[in-house]
Amino acid sequence: MAKINKQVSSLILLLLLVICWSGNLTLRQRLTGLSGDVSVRYVEGAGVSPAQVSRAVRYGKEDGNDSFPELTLWREKRNQPLSDGTFRSGIADVLEFFGDGGSLMPVSMSRGSLPAKGDFQGCAVSKDVAQSLWGSGDVLGKTLVYNGVSYTVRGVFEGCKNLVFVQGGADDEDLYPALLLTFTEGGSNMVEDARNFMTRYSLPIGDILDMSLLLWLVNFLSALPAAVLVIWLVYRLLRQCFRLRFTPLLFIAFLVLAGGAIFLSAWAGNLMGLPQNLIPTKWSDFDYWGKLFQNSSNSLGTALRLSLTARDMQVWSAALTGTLLSVTGAVLSVPMVRRLRARSLNGLGLGCGIWFAAAFGASLFSGAVGGVSQNRGFWLAVPAILISLYAVGLFESHLTFNEKGGIG
């Protein structure tokens, strides 16, 4: 009975770790799409109009600017009355944008797509808005009436409640209070790049937000379960090395084994290398990290000071939830591996097989709800640790056998 209870608890730990790790990586990928750009915010009554953006794009083409960023304007209007043009009506938040709506707020489309740039007669609705107005999710081609204007539904999306996307017109002179710049090549100082770009093309400059520091922190924390496992493995290996310090040949042999185990586990855990945005673009750019930290920390402070938009709420929700899942996964990782640790080759194969099966199931579920494929660390970190522990266990059992046989 005790053995069955141990197996059940081991399986529960494994499933919880898989869920936390997979969920964290999915949220990290979503945050990557939300935080890899530079956004500009304006005070009430100020902003940039689609007409200004259209002129800047035209001037950029005339200049032959190959690194011209993608520009997307947006504004949010809460609790707006909507109707289907007949007798049904409802209330929803409306995100009016000009440019690429997908870069503003990545959503999982169940049908159709977001209205393309220039499609100022098209809209996209969340699934609950479609159910509220038409009683169905199959509403492509239906007419939505908002602010006295009729729009044709181009797509239905999931993941956001009571939200409607509406594309603005290229000649619109109305000011939008938020601008998103997506640079084709990330520079060492995207805040400065954004300011120089806006000055060059006569666009007003507001509060410029670069969330790359937040993205780096979330990327770092997403590797926390694998990092904890590798650190724990290093600790166990150092203890064994200390025991063998007076036997040089065994010490050297174990050191080679330990080095291979650490290298394999670190590689499998995807812990090697620096994130691309932390690598200086110039050999002599000694101020790179200082500027990056200063600009990013200032941007985080500004973002916390400004009123939260729906996009901001997605960013912070993904960051906080992903951090919680990553920390929980790190706490669960060592107890799970200790329970799953194999004493035989068959046990090692079974343990690795159980992990791969659970990881495959989580990957399928993530894909079904609009997630992404998981990285190498998610798939290989635990099997690599199990293999390393098995190899170390064989070495230790050999030492024990020799000691008992008087050969040590």
Image (cartoon, grey):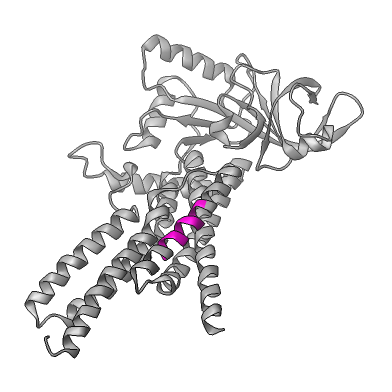
Residue extending farthest to the left is 248
Task: Find out whether residue 356 is within the magenta segment.
Answer: yes
Residue 144 rendering spot, x and y as whole percentages: 79, 25
In this view, the residue farthest toward the right is: 87
Q: Taking the image as drawn, is residue 59 in sight?
A: yes
Q: Does the magenta segment cover residue 365?
A: no
User: Image point 49% across, 55% down: which residue?
Assistant: 359
- Horizontal side, residue 85 vs residue 192: left or right: right
Instruction: Judge left or right: residue 226 versus residue 130.
Output: left
In the image, 236 versus 152, the foreground residue is: 236
Residue lying at 84% horizontally and 27% vertically, measured from the top left? 84
Left or right of residue 39: residue 168: right
The residue positioned 50% from the left and 51% from the top of the image is 360
In the rendered view, does 52 fall on the left or right side of 153? left
Q: Position of residue 281 (x, y in %)?
A: 25, 36
Q: Is residue 56 above or below residue 35?
A: above
Residue 323 in the image, given as x and y percentages of width and height: 49, 58
Note whether 65 is above or below 248 in the view shown: above
Residue 179 position in % (x across, y down):
53, 30
Q: What segment is highlighted magenta in the picture?
A: 351-360
Q: Is residue 319 visible?
A: no
Determine the residue located farthest toward the top in the rendered image. 62
Task: Give the number of marks.
Answer: 0
